[in-house]
Image (cartoon, rainbow, N blue to C red):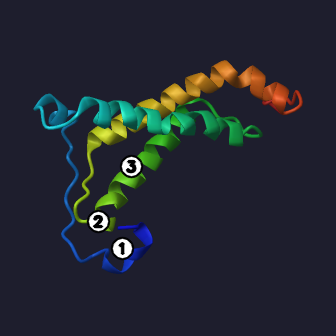
Amino acid sequence: MPVITSLPFIFNHPYKTMNLEPFSDILNGRGDFIRQVVLNVIMTVPFGVLFPLTRYKTNVNFLKTVLFCFLMSLGIELIQPLINGTRFSDITNIITNTIGGAIGYVIYMILRPIANILRGGQNENK
C-alpha cells in the first residue's frame, strides 16, 4: 500500500519493537545476506557522495556525513513500522546503511577533485 493511502490507518495496527540484536536473523539463517546487507549498503552510498556535494560552502567531514547518514537511517527505521503493520525495524539495517554512507564519503573524497573542476574551480574551504 502506498504511504499516502496508509496514513489514515497509521495507528490501526500494533507497533512492532525494533530488533536490537545485530545480524541475528542472518546468523540464524532467517535472512538472505545479499538482500539484508549488501543492498542496504548500496542504497545509502549515494547519500555519502551527495551529502558533501550539497554542502560545499560548509565544512563537511567524514564524521558529520556518517552522523547524518545514521540519523536518516534511524528515522526510516523508526517510522517504518508505523506506516505498515507488516514492516519492522532492525538494528542491522541501521548499521549497514551507515556503512554505506561511509563508503559513499570515501568515494566522494576520491572524486572531489573532479567535483571542484565541475564547480568552476571553487575552493571548498572558503
Q: Nearer the viewer, residue 55 or 25?
A: 25
User: Which amino acid lies under the numbered mark 3 shown in the image of this protein?
Assistant: Leu
According to the picture, the residue beneath numbered tag 3 turns out to be 74
Q: Secondary structure at mark 1?
A: helix
Q: In the image, 89: left or right of 56?
A: left
Quadrant of the rendered image containing residue 124: top right
Quadrant of the rendered image containing residue 23: top left
According to the picture, the residue beneath numbered tag 1 turns out to be 6
Label 1 close to label 2 by CB (< 8 Å): yes
Q: In the image, 111: left or right of 65?
A: right
Q: Position of residue 44 (x, y in %)?
A: 48, 38
- Among the two numbered marks 1 and 2 on one chain, the one whose residue lies closer to the N terminus: 1
Query: CA–CA distance between discs 1 and 2?
Result: 7 Å
Q: Position of residue 118 (x, y in %)?
A: 83, 30
According to the picture, the residue beneath numbered tag 2 turns out to be 84
The local crowd at label 2, few if under 14, some if 14 to 19, many if 20 or more residues have their Cα within 10 Å, is many
Query: CA–CA distance between discs 2 and 3?
Result: 17 Å
Q: Position of residue 90 (x, y in %)?
A: 26, 46
User: Which amino acid lies under the numbered mark 1 shown in the image of this protein?
Assistant: Ser
Q: Who's the residue at 22% across and 34% down the image?
A: 32
> In the image, is residue 123 above or below residue 72?
above
Q: Nearer the viewer, mark 2 or mark 3?
A: 2
The local crowd at label 3, few if under 14, some if 14 to 19, many if 20 or more residues have their Cα within 10 Å, is many
